[in-house]
Amino acid sequence: MPLLTEALKAWIGREVVYPAREDLGRAGIRYFALAIGDDNPLHIDDDYAREAGHPSLVAPPTFIVETCQYAHRQPDEHGYIGHVWHLPIKGCRMIRAGNDYEFFRPVLPTDRVSVTWTLEDMAERESSRGGTQLFVSSVARYYDAAGDLLAVNRETLVYQPLAARA
Amino acid sequence: MITSTKSAASLQPGDALPAAEKTFTAVELVMYGAATWDWHRLHYDPDYADAMQLPGPVVDGQVYGAMFAKQALDWLGPKAFVRRLVFRMRSMAFAGDTLRLEGEVIELRDGRSFDVVVLNQRLTNNGRRVAEATTEVRLPR
């Protein structure tokens, strides 16, 4: 039975917009820097960041493409609140294949970020484990309050069929 | 005084970035999940991981992007800007694993208002490739 059904193909091209909710904030940036073990003063010290040419402290580069702060809902059955398509795929586990990030300027604590997710493509390919797996490619675009692009995140996730358990 | 930022003229292909190691204990996994508003059970719930036929909670692959960017900026300096970061997953890592981060310069390009250095970076777990990245960083002229 193919993973990539006609019903699934109909999802290609779908788009979801997550409006900006609040400033990213200094606390969120410091929390992220602590969590990734990044002690660079650029992320906590305004004076240091200004010396480096920024208007204030800046977020670590990948902060906006890694945080689910744009979301506002209760966790799903997996505990997740970030963007998901809720594709009708059963009996699979989902893993990350990779990401392609582009950044257009440093992100500031005062930035109010809106996010648009688009489902770009799906492809079923042979798996080295035998059988096939489904690759789902999405792109997230992150905009500031003026509507200027801050970052683009092209993400590929893989759905792998689970083995039957006795 | 801020630390200095490397110039493209001071770099050449093959230059190695300082290697680093990081262990992802349950605390690191929860810190990262919380700080990114990502409460997915895959990253802290052993029962959930077992149901997904995995040996334990999985290190969130997104954190590798942060590690690659941090290694690049720590080495290149505070005026460097990560323009593009492309990373590919090669295998999963699990709670308790220690990952080794390495990288080197592969290319230098002249720009009009800035130079670009391209890095190859990789994460390994006891020699097994976990993820690899190609990272483009702008340097002031």
Image (cartoon, coloured by chain):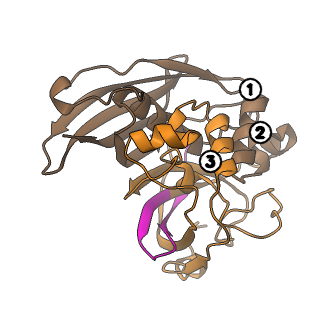
Residue A142 makes an appearance in the image: yes
What residue is pinned by disc 1?
A: B25
- Camera-side mark, 3 or 2: 3
Instruction: For mark 2, name the chain.
Output: B
Identify the colour of chain B in the image. brown
Residue at (72, 29) in percent of width and height: B95
Give, as a single range, the part of the protein colored magenta: A129-155
Q: Is mark 3 on a helix, strand or loop?
A: helix
Q: Which residue is drawn at 64% across and 71% down?
A: A85
The quarter of the picture where residue B4 lies is top left
The orange-tinted chain is A
Q: In which quarter of the image is the C terminus of chain A?
A: top right
Whether A135 is drawn above or below B7: the answer is below
Q: Is the magenta stretch mostly helix, strand or loop?
A: strand
Residue depth check, mark 1 versus mark 3: number of the one nearer the observer = 3
Same chain assignment for discs 1 and 2: yes
To which residue does mark 3 refer?
A29
